[in-house]
Image: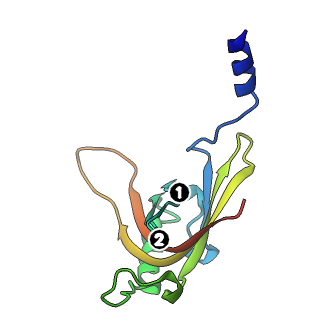
Amino acid sequence: MIENKVISRLGDYEPKYSNRFVVTLPEDFNLPNFTVKSATLPFYNQGKWGTLDVSFTDLIAPSASKALNLLIKRFPYIKYGNNPHTKNSERKILFEYTLSSLDPTGVEVEKWKIYVANIDYINFGHLSYDVEYTRSCHMQIEPHSCELIL
């Protein structure tokens, strides 16, 4: 009897799944949502937001490599003095993007707004004659701040 009550209660709740998400970058980046392969959710540690990763499938068109290369030119790395603990309030926001979790029908159930202070690195992938995989590009960003808005 107790088992039936527990099972009926579990049926009332839908967990969030890690493969139901969408990342929305600024339109002028020319990187459509469907090119995003993976993304890390924000995390907060010892008074600051941790670095976040976004991976892209590198298509022939639109090319993630080309779009990310333009970001390097547009937003060169900013070194904030010799103090790695420079307060976020002193940092400039380069751009912002959203990271949304979806329910099974594609409706947003959680939405983060990420304000980017720096692009730490962009990795254009790996080439090999040994494998036949799709190419990926990876970007690591340093958030200025993150806000859960939904």
Identify which residue is drawn at 40% across, 50% down: 134
**Quadrant that contains the N terminus:** top right
The mark closer to the camera, 1 or 2, is 2
Figure check: 14 above or below 149: above
Label placed on residue 41: 1
Under circle 1, the secondary element is: loop
Identify which residue is drawn at 53% across, 65% down: 62
Q: Residue 39: x and y, percent? A: 50, 56
Q: Earlier in the sequence, mark 1 or mark 2?
A: 1
Query: Horizontal placement of 146 versus 54: left or right?
Result: right
Q: CA distance from mark 1 to mark 2?
A: 14 Å
Q: Residues within 10 Å of mark 1 (few under 14, many from 20)?
A: some
Query: Horizontal placement of 104 versus 146: left or right?
Result: right
Q: Amino acid at mark 2?
A: Lys
Figure check: 147 above or below 39: below
Query: Horizontal placement of 79 versus 61: left or right?
Result: left
Under circle 2, the secondary element is: strand
* In-front residue for pair 126/46: 46
Label placed on residue 48: 2
Q: Residue 7: x and y, percent? A: 70, 19
Identify which residue is drawn at 63% across, 42% down: 16
- Asked where in the image residue 149 lies, by quadrant, the reply is bottom right
Q: Residues within 10 Å of mark 2 (few under 14, many from 20)?
A: some
- Asked where in the image residue 72 lies, by quadrant, the reply is bottom left
**Quadrant that contains the C terminus:** bottom right
Q: Amino acid at mark 1?
A: Leu
